[in-house]
Amino acid sequence: MPRTRTVLATVGAAALLVCGAAPALADGPEPPRHLSQFIAGGADGKPREVFCPSMQHAYSGGFTLSARSDSRLAPEAADVIESRLNDHASGWIVTVRKAQVRKLLVPGKSHQSVPADLTVHIGCTDDTMMHGA
C-alpha cells in the first residue's frame, strides 16, 4: 500500500510540473522567419545582401532568378559567385550573373540582354548561435 501512494504522489508531482511548464513553453523562442527581397536586375554580378531583423541571425538562405513578363531568361547557365551567410550571420549574401533577353520593337534590333531579376531568400531565427558546431 505505501508503494501505491508513492507512485501516485510521483505521478501527481509530474503532472504539476508539466502543467506549470506549459505557459513557459508558450513563451519560448519564436519560430524561424523566412524573408525574401526582390531586386529588379539584381543578377548583375554585384554582391547583394539581405539582413535579418535586429536581434535575429540567419541560418539559411538562397535565391531565385526570374525574367520580366516581356522577357525570358537567357539560355546560358547562371554564374553563381557566392550564396552564403555574411561574416556575422546577420544576413545572407548572393552574387550571381544571369541575363534576361527582352524583345525590342525597334527596327534593326531584335533583342536586348539585361541582368535577370533576383530574389534573395533568407531564414532568420532567435535561437542561440552555435559557431564551429
Image (spheres, helix red, strand yellow):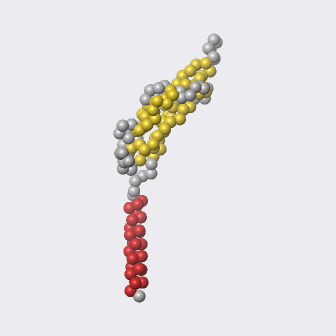
* Count of numbered badges drawn on the protein: 0
Instruction: Name the residue located 40 percent from the left edge and 84 percent from the top edge.
Output: 3
Note whether 16 is above or below 23 in the view shown.
below
Q: Residue 54's quadrant in the figure?
A: top left
Left or right relative to 54: residue 71:
right
Instruction: Name the residue located 39 percent from the left edge and 44 percent from the top edge.
Output: 57
Q: Where does the N terminus fall, quadrant-wise?
A: bottom left
Closer-to-camera residue (57/80): 80
Instruction: Name the residue located 56 percent from the left edge and 31 percent from the top edge.
Output: 66
Left or right relative to 14: residue 80:
right
- Of all residues, the one furthest to the bottom in this rendering is 1
Closer-to-camera residue (53/63): 63
Closer-to-camera residue (105/87): 87
**Residue 88, position as x, y percentages in the image:** 35, 39
**Residue 6, position as x, y percentages in the image:** 38, 81
Note whether 9 is above or below 130 in the view shown.
below
Whether residue 116 is visible here, answered yes or no, is: no
**Residue 85, position as x, y percentages in the image:** 41, 38
- Of all residues, the one furthest to the front in this rendering is 132
Instruction: Name the residue located 38 percent from the left edge and 67 percent from the top edge.
Output: 20
Left or right relative to 56: residue 66:
right
Left or right relative to 131: residue 72:
right
Whether residue 66 is visible here, answered yes or no, is: yes
